[in-house]
Amino acid sequence: MESFHHALKFKYDLCMGCSHCTSVCPTGAIHVEKGHPILNPNRCIDCGRCYLACPVNAIYIEQDDFQTIYNYKYPVVLIPSIFSAQFPETINQCAILSSIHHLGFQYVYETEKSVDIVKSVINKQVTDSGSMKPIISTFCPAIVRLIQVKYPSLVSNLLLIKPPLDLTAMYIKKFLTEEKGIPAEDIGVFYVSPCAAKIAAIKSPVGDEKSPVDGVLNMNYFYSKVYRVIKQGVYKLREENDFHTLSKKSILWSLTEGEINNIPTGRNLAIDEVHNVSQFLDKVENEDVKNIDFLELRACDQSCAGGILCAGNRFLIAERQKKRAQKSPDEVLPEDNNLLNYKDYLVENIKVGKVYPRSMDKLDDNISIAMRKMKKSYEINDSLPQVDCRICGYQTCKALSEAIVNNQATLKQCFFVQRILEQTDRLTTTEAMNIIKAVWGDKKLNKDSIKSLNLE
Amino acid sequence: MDFEYKIEGDDFTNAGAASSAVKKMLNQVGVRPDIIKRTVVALYEAEVNIVVHAYRGTIKIDIDEEKIHIRLEDEGPGIPDIDRAMQKGYSTATPRVREMGFGAGMGLPNMKSNADSLVVTSEVGKGTTVEITNYFN
């Protein structure tokens, strides 16, 4: 099976080898070797907890070069509605919009334009007694991957429909080619992403062949670019304001409870932050919680307002977003949102292909070898200190024992095991030092300053 | 490969520990997700039964290449009529308990529908033994 594409990358030249990223990872995807983090591509779900934990900004999120927008005659930008909530309240929507045009985009759309269509499909599924309950939303791509790797038995509960982002992008292409007569190859749709997971999903869509989005930009990068134009006041103020064509509920969609507040029937729950989601899915898998119709699960605290590429504080962003919703209409008609005239086309194409489980825990493809490895890893784990100190380079003692049975690590990497071996003359201090250096690199263990310290 | 877990009556907060551990193991071995789910659901139901009805119990788990065998032994009041307890909807719960949503009489039937083989033996006043076997193929 091909590995996931990941938008999270490490800059080893900035990394100081502290392993904070290792400790916060919800899927145990990172371990340390030679003083730097190593990512297991089959485990990483691009949730970005590591990005937030890194004290030296050594993790970055890949994006397309801004210059590529000029490769298209008609560059289009697709922004999540949360984007305008990044700005201070004194900056009005018109200034933001005009500045985006100033940067070179011919058309500006908000992704939530298609929420009303997604909403109707979800409602239909929830009332359909034949569907597998609880239905799990696929809005957050990090959650889809989390379920694939950590909760494989819940993969069949995923609602296999395209998120608003994809539908709006599809609409844009169809609208511009059919109504404006622009050749398809001249249209470049660029998405401004609030997180790494959405970028990864565009670069390798789950359950789909190709994304309708042509390029991605990081929201914090794009925010700075737009803010600069606003501050410099170099933009030409535009008359029209495409931002006001969203309904209240569409604007709230990407916030926590945004999806479930649109479902009039059934028992529906919203959970945000990836560790909270994990805890809850454990219960769902045990059938400890039953009779839930729909689960809205988001990897970030405060959902997309807490996206790792957001420029501001997540609570303030959520607040601004709610204020905007208050000023927006309950219902938007097709004459104000042309996308709704394309409802049939979008609904027809809303389904995504099958999503497959890809358990990260499997120790071997051969069941009897896997059995043997599991047995051995439990034996090893029993002899480890359970301190989860990460000095071996792994997130937990258990993770080390699994790496040992897969020949990726040795028992001597354990700090406690080393001390025991030294005491019984089975390991020299030099050997122990070399093992620690192999994990943490030479630099950390060559501190002359420590040698000169008075330790008494 | 065998494991053993201890379980205490009345300890609702820790019910599910064995199910979670078994889930992880079966994932490591590479058992099909739907079989893992069935096993975990059956075991969790059995675990909760001990917490609710018995004083204490032991869970013995034996996994080989073909199957998982789980034996739950408890010290407790026992089940007077196992055949009736296996019937859907049969319950000894009082109306008050039922009003709160418990005691729907689905415990053993639910276990049965999630197990390839379910054997329940019991001695009134001493305890109950539940054996669940699920095959991987």
Image (cartoon, rainbow, N blue to C red):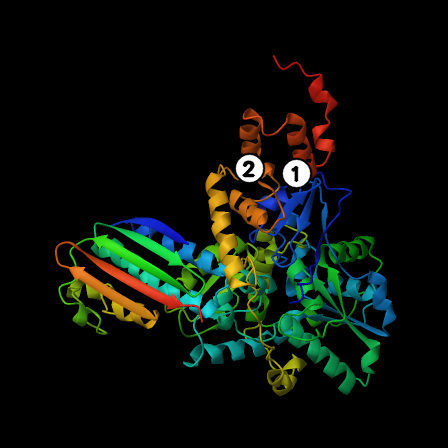
Residue A298 pos. (x, y %): 54, 61
Q: Residue placed at 25% from the left, 55% from the top?
A: B73
Does the CB distance between marks 1 and 2 fall below 8 Å? no
B51 is higher (above) or lower (below) than A13 = below
Few, some or many C-alpha atoms within 10 Å of disc 1 (few <14, some 14-19, many ≥20)? some
Do pointers 1 and 2 mark residues of a single chain? yes
Residue at the disc numbered 1: A18
A241 horizontally vs A417: left or right: right
A95 horizontally vs A283: left or right: right
Residue A208 pos. (x, y %): 65, 75
A273 is higher (above) or lower (below) than A144 = above
Q: Nearer the viewer, residue A161 or A179?
A: A161
- Mark number for residue A389? 2
Q: Earlier in the sequence, mark 1 or mark 2?
A: 1
Quarter the N terminus of chain A occupies? bottom right
Snapshot quadrant of residue A239 = bottom right
Q: Secondary structure at mark 1?
A: loop
